[in-house]
Every structure is written in structure tokens, then in C-alpha cells.
Amino acid sequence: MDDTRLARARSSKNKDLPNSAGTETLNFKVTAQFKREFKGYAVSQGMSMVELLKEGFELARQKRTRQ
């Protein structure tokens, strides 16, 4: 990875988090295939993986609340 892409990846990693105060790590295992697809989809939508996870969680919660 060249320096520009590395810097961009590092800066976008926590772009939706103002700072690390008050945040916690969420750690779980997924297959390499799922990670590639999840990350690829997030990038294609112009969002971070954290943003996609939060959006997906909210949609799942709404769906289960309606039932």
C-alpha cells in the first residue's frame, strides 16, 4: 500500500468518531470472504465499516420491533 492510501485508510478508520474517548472496541470473528464483501460494500457506498455496521444494526432493530 502506498503512503497516500495508507494515510487515507488511517484517517478514515475513525472518521465518524470525534476522538477515542468514550469509545470501545467491538471484537468478533468473521470469515475472510465476509470481511472482503462487507468492506468492499462499505467502500462502494462511501462509508466506513463502522457506519455500515451501525446502519445495519439500526435496520435490524427496526425490522424486529415491527414484527
Image (cartoon, grey):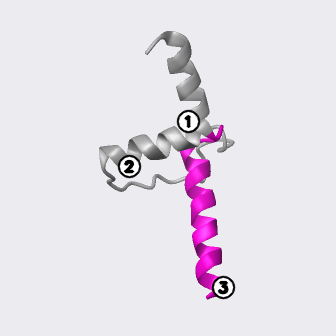
The quarter of the picture where the N terminus appears is: top left
Residue type at the position of mark 2: Phe
Q: Nearer the viewer, residue 20 or 1?
A: 1
Q: Is residue 13 visible?
A: yes
Q: Is residue 14 visible?
A: no
Disc 1 to disc 2, C-alpha distance: 18 Å
**Residue topped by disc 2:** 34
Chain part drawn in magenta = 45-67
Q: Is 35 placed left or right of 62 in the picture?
A: left
Question: In the orientation shown, which residue stands out farthest toward the bottom?
Answer: 67
**Residue topped by disc 1:** 13
Circle nearer the viewer, 1 or 2: 2
Dots 1 and 3: beta carbons under 8 Å?
Answer: no
Disc 1 to disc 3, C-alpha distance: 33 Å
Instruction: Name the secondary structure under disc 1.
Output: helix
| Above or below: residue 29 compared with residue 37 | below
* Among the two numbered marks 3 and 2 on one chain, the one whose residue lies closer to the N terminus: 2
Task: Give residue 66's quadrant in the image.
Answer: bottom right
- The residue drawn where x is 63% and y is 67% is 58
Q: Residues within 10 Å of mark 1 (few under 14, many from 20)?
A: few
Residue 66 covered by magenta stretch: yes
Residue 63 covered by magenta stretch: yes
- The residue drawn where x is 57% and y is 36% is 43
Across and down, in percent, residue 24 comes to 50, 54
Across and down, in percent, residue 34 comes to 38, 49
Across and down, in percent, residue 52 comes to 59, 51
Residue type at the position of mark 3: Arg
* Among the two numbered marks 1 and 2 on one chain, the one whose residue lies closer to the N terminus: 1
The quarter of the picture where the C terminus appears is: bottom right
**Residue topped by disc 3:** 66
